[in-house]
Image (cartoon, grey):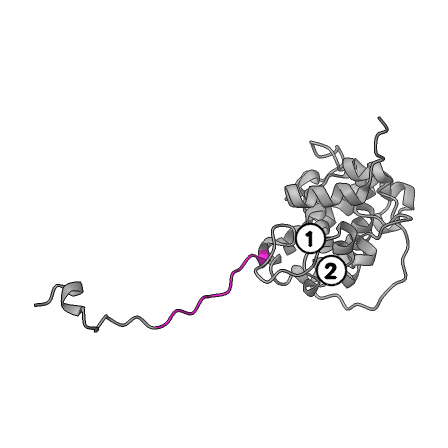
Amino acid sequence: MTSKPFSRRSFLSNTARATGGVITLGVLSRTGAIDAQETPPFEYTWQNLDARQGRTVDALTRMIMPSDDNDPGAAEARVIVYIDRALGSHRAEYKESYVSGLAAFDRYCQLSHEAGFLDLDTRNQRRALMGIDRARSPRNWPDDAPMGARDFLRMLVTHTMEGMFSDPSYGGNYRETGWKLIRFPGRAAFGYDPPFSEFDMTIPEIEYPEWKPYDGPMKSRIVGEA
């Protein structure tokens, strides 16, 4: 029997449906992940991250979900737009985690690679990201950081997947790039399962007519009146 080659498209499709899109760097690296490819820039005004924070998150999402010769990634889906906007709305509780986590990550890069993340070459950026993908925080992760390295990475991976596959109205999944990647059929009237996403899972209120007591011909038998 001939085994079928590993397909990122099929893996993402099955995983997103079965587990809500929780994907690790180890799995993504099987497809040559962590090699972010350049894409043409687009105009964007930061809303909740500053320029350096935004550029760092953008670069990390591109490495977590890179483009390849056949399929688009975080860059084409404009995942960074989703994350930046979400930090001012349904993911506002994570804003401080991004600010402190990015500061800790930059200090980690300084201690481990002698430069901030954005100042590293591609090889050392890849090493820095892979260095925090472990059960325990690496030796050079700041002791006073309010979150561990793995927690910071998991947050990034989770929100990268949201930005890839959530409704385009939230800023990511540009031109339904993520949906096309996994052949998702499109918008759903009553919301989606995660990561399409749980903050969309609201069912419209049903308007019922005003209740009025029965006053018909069988009223005496129904309410016990003589």
* Residue labelled with disc 1: 162
Helix, strand or loop at label 2? It is loop
Question: Which residue in the rendered view is the most extreme toward the front?
Answer: 217
| Spot occupied by residue 31 in the image (x, y as percentages of width and height) | 85, 39
Q: Give the total of numbered labels.
A: 2
Query: Is residue 206 found left or right of 226 in the rendered image?
Result: right
Which residue lies at the image location 77% right of the left edge and 53% below the top edge?
57
Question: Label 1 crowding class (10 Å Cα cut-off): few <14, some 14-19, many 20+?
Answer: many
For the point 56% across and 60% down, the residue is 190
* For residue 201, side relative to residue 6 (left or right): left
Give the residue type that dot 2 points to: Gly
Give the residue type that dot 1 points to.
Answer: Glu
**Segment tinted magenta in the rendering:** 199-209
The percent coordinates of residue 113 (x first, y second) are: 86, 40
Q: CA distance from mark 1 to mark 2?
A: 8 Å
- Residue 187 higher or lower than 9, as above or below: below
Identified at 18% across, 68% down, the residue is 218
Q: Foreground: 40 or 124?
A: 40
Decide: marks 1, 2 in contact (CB < 8 A)? yes
Q: Main secondary structure of the magenta part?
A: loop
- Image height of 98 relative to 44, above or below: above
Residue 21 at what x, y percent from top left? Answer: 68, 45
Q: Which of the 4 quarters of the picture holds residue 64?
A: top right
